[in-house]
Amino acid sequence: MDIKERNKAYNKYVSAKVPKTKPWPTLFNSFWVGGLICLIGQGINDLILFLAPNISEQSAWAYTLISLIFIASFLTGIGVYDKIGKFAGGGSIVPITGFSNSITSPSVEFKSEGIVYGICVKMFTIAGPVIVFGVISSAFVGLIYYIVYLFI
């Protein structure tokens, strides 16, 4: 059996084993759950601005993001966010809560391996590249801004 025939047989095997999804219900669930997460974030922001009227809007958004990250991490720790992710798909992954889940989930899963080799190392397995490229791209944009600012 040559490589092409093996690849064909493997692809046939994989397509038979992969669970079939229904695209429209999945798309709908993703849309409304992602919207609900954003609605909760807006509600938290409005509540912060209402309870602390002297706070700047930028600070209120920072506190809102901190709150959403905490809520998502807490829900991941007790096993609820994974069920939300299974139901909503991309709707729960795209907001900042999905990033929080991607850091917290490996930490919880590898807790038994210890603090350093379990929690600290595995925590950035998924989120590490996002953080690295975020920092590098922001430094690059800041450098361009600085150069443009010097010459204008």
Image (cartoon, helix red, strand yellow):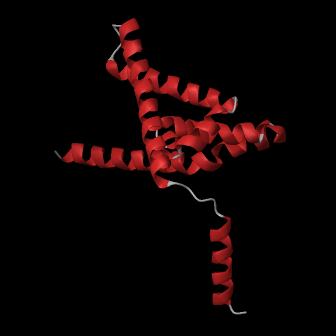
Q: Quadrant of the C terminus?
A: top left
Residue 17 sits in which quadrant?
bottom right
Position of residue 93 measured from the top left corner of the image (x, y, whole percent): 52, 43
Quadrant including the N terminus: bottom right
Snapshot quadrant of residue 57: top left
Q: Nearer the viewer, residue 152 or 115?
A: 115
Hey, which residue is sitting farthest bottom in the picture? 2
Rendered location of residue 59, percent (x, y): 39, 20
Residue drawn at the location 47% of the way across and 27% of the way down: 65
View extreme (left): residue: 152
> How many numbered tags mark residues here?
0
Residue depicted at x 63% and y 59%: 19
Q: Position of residue 112 (x, y in %)?
A: 83, 39
- Does residue 52 appear in this view? no
At 63% from the left and 26% from the top, the residue drawn is 74
Q: Residue at x 48, y 47 (%)?
A: 25
Foreground residue, 1 or 114?
1
Q: Is residue 18 visible?
A: yes
**Residue 61 placed where, x, y %?**
39, 24
Residue 15 versus residue 52 in the image, above or below: below
Q: Nearer the viewer, residue 90 or 113?
A: 90
